[in-house]
Every structure is written in C-alpha cells, then in structure tokens.
Image: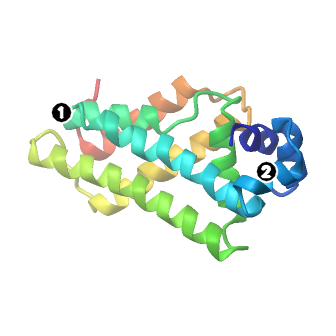
Amino acid sequence: MDAAIAAGAERGLRSLSLTDVAAKAGLTRGAVLYYYADLEALLVEVHKAGVARLCDGRDAELATLADARQMLVAAIRAGLPTGPDDALMRLLYEFDVLAGASPLHDDLVRAMYERQHATYLRILRLGEQQGHFRIKADAEQVAMNLVALEDAYGLHIVGGNILIGTEQAEAAIVSVAEHLTHCTLG
C-alpha cells in the first residue's frame, strides 16, 4: 500500500498502473497480483487507509474530548493535510475526481463525505446541547459547509499553494466555525 500511495502521488491515479506500483515496491507485477486481484482492489485498500486516517483517527481523537468547542477545533485540525507532501491526502482528493466515472469511486467518495459530515454534525449538536453553540442556520448545512471548507483548503494545501498552509487553513476554518456557531473557539 505504501508503494501504491507513493506511486500514485508521483504519477496520479489516472496514469497509475499496477506495474508502477510493483516497481515502487521492488516487486514484480505478479507478486502484487498475489495480494490484490487488480489495481482497483489495491486502490480500494488505499482509500480505506485514507478513511482510517481521516475519519477513524479523527473520531478516536474526538472521543477523548468532552467539550464541543475543543472537539470542533480538533476536528478541523485533523481533517486537513499535514502539508503539500501528504501523499495519502493527495490521493483522496484524486479519488474525488474519479467519482462520476466509476460506481465504485462514487460509493467510496460518498461514504467518506457522509463520515466527514456526520462528525461535524455530531459536534455541532453536542455544542448546542452543552449551551456553547447557537446555530441560527440549519445544522446539516453548517456541517456541509465545514466539510466543504476542509476539502477546499485541503486541496490547496496538497496542491502546493504557497499562500495557504495548514495553519492558515485551520485558522480560516475556525474563524468561519466561530461565526456559524456564535461561539469563540479559542
């Protein structure tokens, strides 16, 4: 999988071949096929690794926090790439591009979006219950906007936009979240 992530980051998903992955891993194409039926099966595993990092990892971190304000900041931070060299996050954005061309990719991208949205929605509702957040808009739409901001800034980060780094993106999203929740997040 590490070889698939590295080769995908170098070549892009549209140009990636099983031979590229095998070469990056120092294996033959046949050796890779021993473990995965084809490139598509390997890419599904790469996507699962992305979901594990972005969604499962974030949810595990949030489970250690009780205050919705802290959870919202932590969720925003965990949802962003570490920087332009974050190969796994880059590939996740490339999966988004493939959606619409493949039912499998449609399902993978939709499932990930639903996880991202559910995480933000859960935090927003908890913040209202705790009396911290006063959301005047529809909470579903607020969560949708937070996912959109996370994805848009993340794309700029992995794209190497020197004007938007992880810290700037986090600060910008937190600022919008404060406005939408009518709460200072710190």
- The residue under label 1 is which amino acid type? Asp
Q: In the figure, residue 102 lies in which quadrant?
A: bottom right
Residue 57 horizontal side relative to residue 90, left or right: left
Q: Which residue is drawn at 89% across and 40% down?
A: 23
Question: If you read the primary sequence from the N terminus, does the residue marked by circle 1 or circle 2 appear first?
Answer: 2
Crowdedness of circle 2 by 10 Å Cα count: few (<14), some, many (20+)? some
* Image quarter hosting the N terminus: top right
Can residue 72 be seen in the rendering of this structure? no
* Helix, strand or loop for disc 2: helix
Relative to 64, 157 lies left or right: right
Task: Kindly report which numbered mark, 1 or 2, lies closer to the viewer in this rendering.
Answer: 2
Does any portion of residue 124 appear in the rendered image?
yes
Q: Which mark is residue 67?
A: 1
Pick the front one: 7 or 18: 18
Q: Is 108 in front, or is 93?
A: 108
Q: What residue type is labelled 2?
A: Val
Q: How crowded is mark 1: few (under 14 residues within 10 Å), some or many (20 or more)?
A: some
Identify the image quadrant of the C terminus.
top left
Secondary structure category for the residue under label 1: loop
Up-down: is 160 above or below 46?
above
Picture layout, residue 162 above or below residue 31: above
Residue 73 pos. (x, y %): 34, 32
Report x, y in % for residue 66.
Answer: 17, 34
Say the numbered circle drawn on residue 119: none
In three-dimensional space, the C-alpha distance between marks 1 and 2, rounded to whole angstroms, equals 46 Å
Residue 178 vs residue 11: left or right? left
Q: Residue 32 carries which label?
A: 2
Q: Which residue is drawn at 41% across and 56% down?
A: 115
Q: Which of 129 and 24 is in front in this view?
A: 24
Q: Residue at x 59, y 40 (%)?
A: 154
Single out the residue that lies furthest toward the bottom. Answer: 103
x, y percent for residue 118: 34, 57
